[in-house]
Amino acid sequence: MCQVGEDYGDPAPEGPPPPRPGRELKCVKCKEGVPVVVIRAGDAFCRDCFRAFYVHKFRAVLGKNRLIFPGEKVLLAWSGGPSSSSMVWQVLEGLSRDSAKRLRFVPGVIYVDEGAACGQSPEDRAKTVAEVKLILQTLGFPWHIVALEEVFGLSPSVLRCSAQEPVGAVGTYKVAVDSFLQQQHTLGTERSGGSPSPAQGEERLSPPGTQESQDPAGPPPAAQTEALSRLFDSVKTLTAKEEFLHTLRTHLILHVARTHGYSKVMTGDSCTRLAIKLMTSLALGRGAFLAWDTGFSDERHGDVVVVRPMRDHTLKEVAFYNRLFAVPSVFTPAIDTKAPEKASIHRLMEGFLLRLQAQFPSTVSTVYRTSEKLVKAPRDGCAAGPRCLLCMCTLDVDAADSATAFGAQTSGFSQTQPPTPRAGAGAPTEVGGAQDRCQGAGPCGREDSRARVIERLCYGCRANMKDVGLAGDPGVSGG
């Protein structure tokens, strides 16, 4: 029997066991290099093979979908974080002359200063913007720095779905490529006097850094900053704050894209972030719009298409790539920085999935592959049905006879008739194609305005707007 104090030999050594002789780990790609990155169990890559693997995944996503046409203007939404910084770096390397297969679109970069919504001081915001400018000036792309306060100056047209089809919707990708190559050949022939030069013909794809660069004249007006701070302070939950911030940021980026002639917008959503977003959207009642929120392309806005070329890269791969190849980034505190895990649905889902991923390495990829199987409803223009005023998704309701919970909540408002304005009153103002308010005296105008706004929101946006205080429907619980 075992005795107390019995000696069982030397204590177990601390640290990892020594490697077995003759079984040194090698790169799974070239079988020769010393691995520096282990992506998954058994997938060890050396530096050069990991770079080729990472770049191939980025190019493969763009080549497989074929939505970005040659010569098209593409706006890169850069937040300063790891994923969006890696995306900008991939585009920069893809446009270089040393690249094997050069990218043929014309990029631009936009940075949205969200310091007012996140509670930053003016000094910290100015320091961050100065750091952002230093990085943007080294890229050589046209860049735009806009403050979130500029949403107060947007026209009501941002709430309308544009009936214009996005660039590239007519014709095929192969025809567009052939036309572009023929155009470059003709341009090179004219410049060289008979000896075409591809390098000369493609010079215009590398715009100078000062062209179309939007340098803000100074900080936004203090009145707008205070108004934005009060707006976010009035939001009750962190979940509603994050959704509201995402909505405002999207409308601002789309406005800049339309103003400067960009037909595509690239975002740096990674595979891990999209898996978290899918689970969060389900919890927020946005299950009908998952294909638009997590797919490669998002055509809900009509004339501007949002694409996500980083959707095959995990956060682990992005972190290793940025570390190994010194990709510059800017750290800015987010609206949920230092918030506890249960402070919002976004934080709760993130912690849940990342803990599962640590124990079961295929969790994120399984959720992500599920999102790839979702099918989008056919887009027949804006006449397909009413759209949400905030997220611009088609409302999933049946105005005639709906048995859904959302349809039951909106059935009373759909039967409401607009009040008749009194004689002498001005014409009603329209915002987003809907009557905004009644010009007549009395509270009926405000109640009718609230009812009509609620009627034009989807279920998820309505729940968040209740926390913002713009909706008063007691049947919808807040996030």
Image: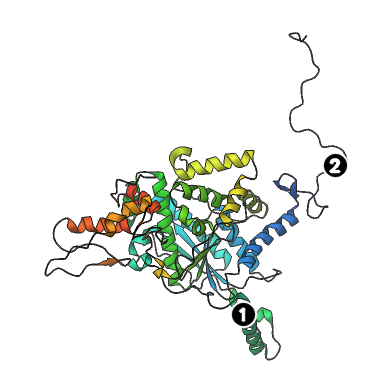
Above or below, comparing residue 8 to residue 69 in the picture: above
Query: Of 127 and 322, which appears nearest the observer?
Result: 322
Q: How many numbered badges does the structure rendering display?
A: 2
Q: Residue 175 carries which label?
A: 1
Residue 261 visible in the snapshot: yes
The segment highlighted magenta reads 13-25
Q: Is residue 363 left or right of residue 133?
A: right
Q: Mark 2 points at which residue?
A: 23
Q: Which quadrant of the figure contains the N terminus?
A: top right
Q: Which residue is drawn at 44% across and 42% down?
A: 344
Q: Which quadrant of the figure contains the C terminus?
A: top left
Query: Residue 22 is drawn in which quadrant?
Result: top right
Above or below, comparing residue 125 to residue 204 in the picture: above
Query: Of 238 and 33, which appears nearest the observer?
Result: 238
Q: Residue furthest bottom?
A: 193
Residue 122 visible in the snapshot: no
Q: Is mark 2 on a helix, strand or loop?
A: loop
How would you classify the magenta stretch by its main secondary structure? loop
Does the magenta segment cover residue 18? yes
